[in-house]
Image: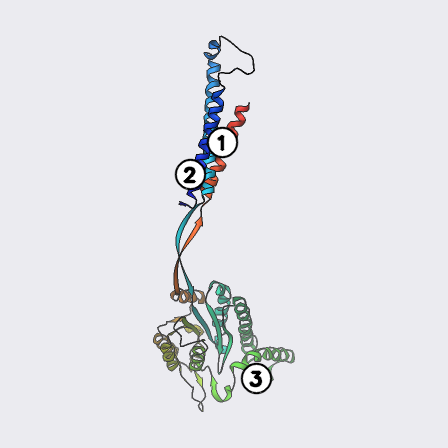
Amino acid sequence: MELMNVWAIVVGLIITAIAAALAFFIKYEGKEKYTHGVKASNTSLIKSSKVYKSLNKQYNVLRAALAIGMVGSILSSLFLVARPYKTQDVYTGVKKRDIIICMDVSYSLYDLNMELVDYLKGVVHGLAGDRIGVNIFNTSTVTYVPMTDDYDYVEMKLGELSNYFVMQKELYEEYYDVYGTYLSDYPDDVYEKYMALREKLEYYDAGTLHHNSSKGSSLIGEGLGTALYTFPYLGEKDRTRFIILSTDNELNESWGYKQIMDVNTAAKYCQSNDVTVYGIFPDEEDFYDPEEYSYSACKQELANAMATTGGTLYVRTDDLPVSAIVKDITKKEVITANMVMSRETQDVPRPPFIALIICLAFTCAAGLVLQK
């Protein structure tokens, strides 16, 4: 701890010393002069009594306490006027992470995606200083949330996506699993509710299933490639960029259409642009259509693609939920840029202020007792 105005203590002590000297001089200058009161003689007997000695001892202790309190109050006040402070070196850096959540919104992944967005809604505000974007894809890709640091907006849009995945789940579990996929088998009242639900789903599907009859669905390579080129100023090296990709890697490409880029090609483009990709893959029990697609083959291909970018493929299980996966990913990628060291001055008034309060209380207590 240092003092900003050392001169205040020096000047204060000089003034205090002068005032004390004047008070002492004035008091003892007239000590021998009798001014008023009743003169008494032969007081030695009283002074030798135990009561007098005890009271005199108490009096001297209280006078000493009063003097100590006054001196302490003066010194504390002078320290406050002198403005005690401390200096510290503060290292500041601006987080420069760009994160894109890239979700395969095929209806086979509604449980995984719903868990992902529900968790992200709770942690998005913890990404202070970062920018975040959301892409959803199936046949085609929609930039659902452009790169932004408006976390309230991101949270709102994630809430909308959560409703979308809830509706996907409702479609399968309350209609397809119960009544099948032939609409002619639906009772009239169920059919009306089904069509109302389909109308709501088409709001999202219109963007992600564009030309799906000719191109197919779950075009993972195109979805990842589009997410890559969603990053603004991709060529600049001043930001850390990574993608969180949720998919089951079940490519349903049409026989008459070839993807612009497959998942391995997209991963190589990510690598060349210093973008790390982390994949979230469903557990084998939740894998859709295992009769047509090989679980191990789909997982291995995606794991290889993630490794190409320097990332990792996580398999969502009961022991490794989405929350733990996202925590691990964001922990790995905490990087700050533009680290700056600055020396800050901070006032430290608390110690002398507390001392002043204690000394004043001590002085007042001693003065009140002396008055009695």
Q: Is residue 4 above or below residue 274?
A: above
The answer, for residue 23, to whether it is visible in the render is yes
Amino acid type indicated by mark 3: Tyr
Report the number of numbered marks. Answer: 3
* Between discs 2 and 1, the one toward the N terminus: 2
The front one of 31 and 91 is 31
Residue for badge 2: 10
Residue 333 x, y percent position in the rendering: 39, 67
Per the image, the residue denoted by label 3 is: 182
Q: What element does badge 1 sit on?
A: helix
**In the foreground, 205 or 361:** 361
Element at label 2: helix
Q: Earlier in the sequence, mark 1 or mark 3?
A: 3
Q: What is the crowding at mark 1: few (fewer than 14 residues within 10 Å), some, or many (at least 20)?
A: some
Q: Amino acid at mark 1?
A: Phe
Q: Nearer the viewer, mark 2 or mark 3?
A: 2
**Which disc is residue 362 wearing?**
1
User: What element does badge 3 sit on?
Assistant: loop
Mark 3 surroundings: few (<14), some (14-19) or many (≥20) residues within 10 A: few
Q: CA distance from mark 1 to mark 3?
A: 91 Å
Q: Quadrant of the C terminus?
A: top right
Q: Can you give x and y, in whole percent of width and height, for residue 111 in the image? A: 49, 72
Q: Do labels 2 and 3 touch, CB within 8 Å?
A: no
The percent coordinates of residue 71 (x first, y second) are 45, 32
Disc 1 versus disc 3: nearer the observer: 1
Can you say whether 73 is above or below 142 in the image? Answer: above
Q: Is any atom of residue 69 visible in this view? A: no
Query: Where residue 153 sits: x, y (%)?
Result: 54, 69
Ranked by sequence position, the earlier of labels 2 and 3 is: 2
